[in-house]
Amino acid sequence: ISDAAFEDYLFVMGTTIAAEAVDGSGRSGGDGGSRNSRSDGITGERERDAKDIMYFNFAPVYRGGMACQDSDHCHQYAILKRYISNADFLSRTTLPNPSEYDMHAYSRADRSAILRETFAKRNVTVITDNYVEIDGIKIGIEICLDHRMGSLWNNLRTRHDSELVDVQLITSAGMSIERGPNPIKPGGVVYLCDGEASSAACLRTDTGDFDPDHVCRGKPDGLQHKPHGGAGYSNFFALAGCIDMEKDHLLEGYYSMYQPQGCANTLKTYGIDVMDEFAYYPPSLEIYPTVELPRSVAA
């Protein structure tokens, strides 16, 4: 992605789960007599209490087209997720699932010496407020459940004087644009890429005061992204093109043949059903029309 051809691209590389022992050493914390003490590290075979471990979930976000020479000219970010959901963890991993231990929030980045050091060595900026600005474009990025909980809008109100963003990006597995607030400027746009549903896009078409219950919300009743929008506040718009990626060798082995995916699945969320029963549909590259961002953004 460092090729010059990608200098106007922003890549959101899915999400990554990380875990660290509470004392930051790679070994569980606690003294010798404590219930929480362990003789094995967090990769050992013994069952561990999830509360002995700090969990992190983040989306690597990179601007393409340039090598990162120094921190002042480096658009490499780790967008931290705040809220834990059941979909975040696989049952076959060696670590306990924190959602089964009544844990609802990920650890704060400032508690992790290992994570901070690792990101610093790679010139990666840790983002805790869902907000980045690149070339004057204000971008909000949310991971799955954070969107439903309104993380971006909460951070804009408490840390950015309620300033709205030009572009909102949602990366998820079982989420929809309609399920959370979309704090975009008039003329701004929301994009969603969902591993369990489809992609979707919504343009804000009203010019009034921002209403978190209406902008790109319509009727929040599931994963149905209607390209015709609703209520005069928003405009869900359809794909400009779609390419199924079944034969791309880069994706070989990285998707499930049992998961509804692909261009046909996305069209079905728009109410256009071209899917065959029990058919297998591959991952897809889904392309939306060019959107002219709000005039306050420099070209």
Image (cartoon, rainbow, N blue to C red):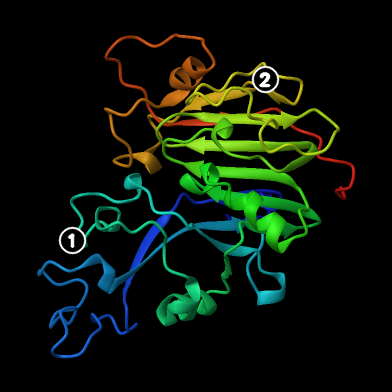
The amino acid on which the numbered mark 1 sits, given as a three-letter code, is Thr
Examine the rendering and report whether any part of residue 70 can be seen.
no
Q: Quadrant of residue 247?
A: top left
Residue located 49% across and 51% down the image: 13
Please state which of the two labelled residues, at mark 1 or mark 2, is closer to the viewer: 2
Residue that label 2 marks: 229
* Front position in the image: 251 or 26: 26
Residue located 84% across and 40% down the image: 294
Q: Position of residue 213 (x, y in %)?
A: 66, 34
Q: CA distance from mark 1 to mark 2?
A: 44 Å
Q: Position of residue 17 (x, y in %)?
A: 37, 59
Q: Position of residue 55 (x, y in %)?
A: 36, 65
- Residue 94's mark? 1
* Front position in the image: 100 or 225: 100
- The correct choice, above or below, for 11 with respect to 159 in the image is above
The extreme left residue here reads 46
